[in-house]
Structures are given as C-alpha cells and as structure tokens.
Amino acid sequence: MKRTNHAQEIAQRFRSLVEESGDNLPSQHYSELALLIEAGIDTALFESLEKIADEMDKLSQKIRHNAEFFD
C-alpha cells in the first residue's frame, strides 16, 4: 500500500510541475504514470529481495558445510 501511495504522490508532484509550467495533460495520463512508477518500485524491490535471498542461500550453505566439519 505504501508503494501505491508513494507512486501517486510522485505522479501528483509531476502533475504540479506540468501545471506550473502552464501545460496540461488528461487525468488518465497521471493515473497511468502512477501505475508505471509503482511497477518500477515493485521491480526494484523484487530485485533487491532476490539478491538478499541469494546471500541467505550462500550463508546457509556455508553454515551447513561448517556444521558437517565441526570438531
């Protein structure tokens, strides 16, 4: 939910910048922009989580290896 709100806030800020410059876009475009921003946030989040999962996998393998050779 925070991602959705953050994406909408970014799109709203962009809308403010566009309108301050004297331009105007249909509201639908800002909704689409918010969806694109949210998708970008999701992609970055999933890539980050995948890296963390890979690190945890390596660590668990190291722990298992050390446990097998524990004196």
Image (cartoon, grey):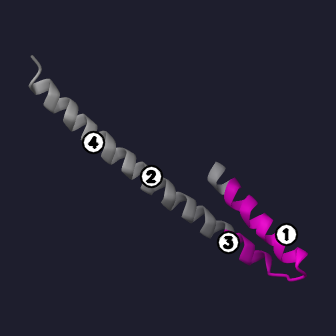
Mark 2 or 1, nearer chain start: 1
Q: Is residue 1 visible?
A: no
Identify the residue under disc 2: 48
Residue 43 shown left or right of residue 9 in the figure: left
Mark 4 or 2, nearer chain start: 2
Mark 3 or 2, closer to the camera = 2
Alpha carbon distance from label 3 to label 1 = 13 Å
Residue at 12% x, 20% y is 70
Q: Is residue 11 magenta?
A: yes
Identify the residue under disc 3: 33
Residue 34 shown left or right of residue 70 in the figure: right
Could you tell me if the residues under marks 3 and 4 are in contact, i.e. CB atoms within 8 Å?
A: no
Residue at 49% x, 61% y is 43
Secondary structure that dominates the magenta span = helix
Disc 4 marks a residue whose amino acid type is Asp
Identify the residue under disc 1: 16
Disc 3 marks a residue whose amino acid type is Leu
Disc 1 marks a residue whose amino acid type is Ser
